[in-house]
Amino acid sequence: MTTDGRTGPAPVPTGPLSKIDYSERIPNNVNLADDRRLQRALEGWQPKFLDWWKTLGPALPTKDVYLRTAIAVGRDGWAHFDHVPMEDYRWGIFLAERDPDRVVSFGKHRGEPAWQEVPGEHRADLMRLIVIQGDTEPASVEQQRVLGNTAPSIYDLRNLFQVNVEEGRHLWAMVYLLHAYFGREGREEAEQLLKRNSGDLDSPRILGAFNEATTDWLQFFMFTYFTDRDGKYQLGTLKESAFDPLARTCEFMLKEEAHHMFVGTTGVQRIVERTAEVMKEKGGAATFEDGVIPLDVIQKYLNFQFSVSMDLFGGEQSTNAGNYYSSGLKGRWQETRRKDDHVLLEDTRTMRYVEDGEIREKEVPMLSALNLDLRDEYVADCANGVRRWNQALEEAGLDERLILPHEGFNRRVGTYSQHHVSPEGQVLTDEEWASVRDGYLPSDQDRADVATLMVPEYEYGKFAGWIAPPLTGINDQPVEFDYVHLAEEGLV
Ligand code: BYC
Ligand code: FE
Ligand code: FE
């Protein structure tokens, strides 16, 4: 039952803005009812998704959560907020509005009308991109499964669940494309998206960062800051795709994504603020005994999550990326705003690499280095958050600062993967690395120490001692609002 005694999902208002049909079993704005075969196939997948959500979704039992649901895909008023039992969340299929005049903006098909169907020659590559994208979404839900048990506040718990249900919807977004455009093979891939699982030894998730455990809330906030931001940039390139349904799908996903990064930016900021406060009081370093996370441990978590997220961009030089671009499958960040020929056959750029124990630069064809092009945009964006967090230290009158590690630090993918590079950009020998590693990356002891602080605070308006409260609540509600009703009364 919901707060006001109703049973079942909260009604979602429909108005002139709304194009999303909530009377259907699968809410959608793609006229699913007109395509019975597709509708039946997706309705066949739906119970498997719900099973997966029950088994590998959020572990903490709740009655309902104050969640936002998409009600329209337009610029304004797309979200509706209400208390909803999480299993009744209306996961659905929402694509941004179609522009009938849209043309391909890059590659060899530049200027041709955007594709409404999948061209046979690009079928395998497009399916691969969609499967990789789709694989990350449920992976993150699995990674964050038990965090609810140690939430620092009801406000943060609600944000966790909001991120979780939306990552679930992002899975729906990719499954829709697989079912609608890739036939039997697509349906098989959709099944596999629920069968691979994060960290599973036999059938892990596809990309490295999505098999790492999200051990605690510090890591969760670093994840939503750094790893969801990879999502933002990858979706930004797929939004440029010549395959119009993919472009429109990603455009709408990006709207949801903004909140995930807000959770990361403000989450880390609030932790830094609290630590800075204690440092100021003490006139020296804060330790776990003070009940907060020491700044050097925050830095180590930052180093870790940044470097594993950098790996998600693939190799600096990639023929895959060049081919995707030339074929029109995957563009660059803000492709249409770039002032060049959008074909890039003649262009070059510099890239850094390690040679003779030092970092050098070389000139490479632009088309071969598009993963790097995207990664550079990402790094510049990541630096903004670090600046913001440092402001909190500055405002507390402290000299200590957080840094964004060097691009070569702790890399498993690409040109740096054969080398050790310090966060400051020093190339290290194997022995040097072994002796300094625990100063740069969270050790088991660090994680265990952070874990001791992770005790749940479920009282409305209260916050665990290691994190500052946010300035404002969600959707103009007060910070102490009852964002989540837990299942057992005794817990509250
Ligand atoms: N782990 O040619 P290369 C999100 C493989 S996050 C394991 O450089 P490419 C979200 C690669 O597959 C966004 N393997 O790779 C965030 C290739 O294998 P094959 C997710 C890796 O293709 C938070 C080989 O190494 N979306 O949405 O240029 C919460 C050679 O590599 C990794 C996408 O990623 C790795 N890290 O680039 C929820 C968009 N990196 O073909 C959600 C779709 C590379 O030799 N994906 N490999 O067997 C792509 O565009 C590309 O596949 C990649 C890799 C950018 C991932
Ligand atoms: Fe997502
Ligand atoms: Fe996300």
Image (cartoon, rainbow, N blue to C red):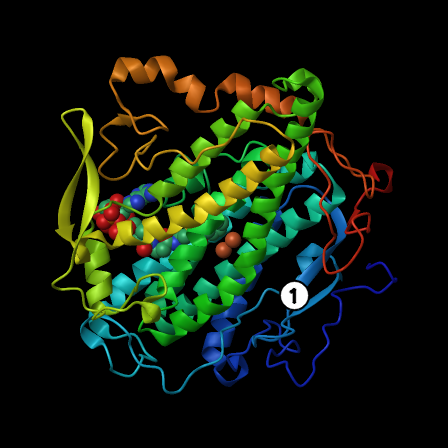
Q: Quadrant of the N terminus?
A: bottom right
In the rendering, at what x and y percent does residue 340 appear? 23, 68
Q: Quadrant of the C terminus?
A: top right
Residue 274 x/y as whole percent: 68, 31
Residue 366 location in percent, x, y? 18, 56
> In front here: 140 or 252?
252
Q: Where 310 sits versus 53, above or below?
A: above
As drawn, is 461 to the left or to the right of 283?
right
Residue under label 1: 69
The residue positioned 20% from the left and 36% from the top of the image is: 353
Which of these two is toward me, 489 or 388? 388
Figure check: 162 above or below 461: below
Find residue 78 and report its image quarter: bottom right
In depth, the one of 198 and 267 nearer the eye is 267
Question: Label 1 sits on what residue type?
Answer: Thr
Is 293 in front, or is 492?
Answer: 293
Is residue 256 found left or right of 381 in the rendered image? right
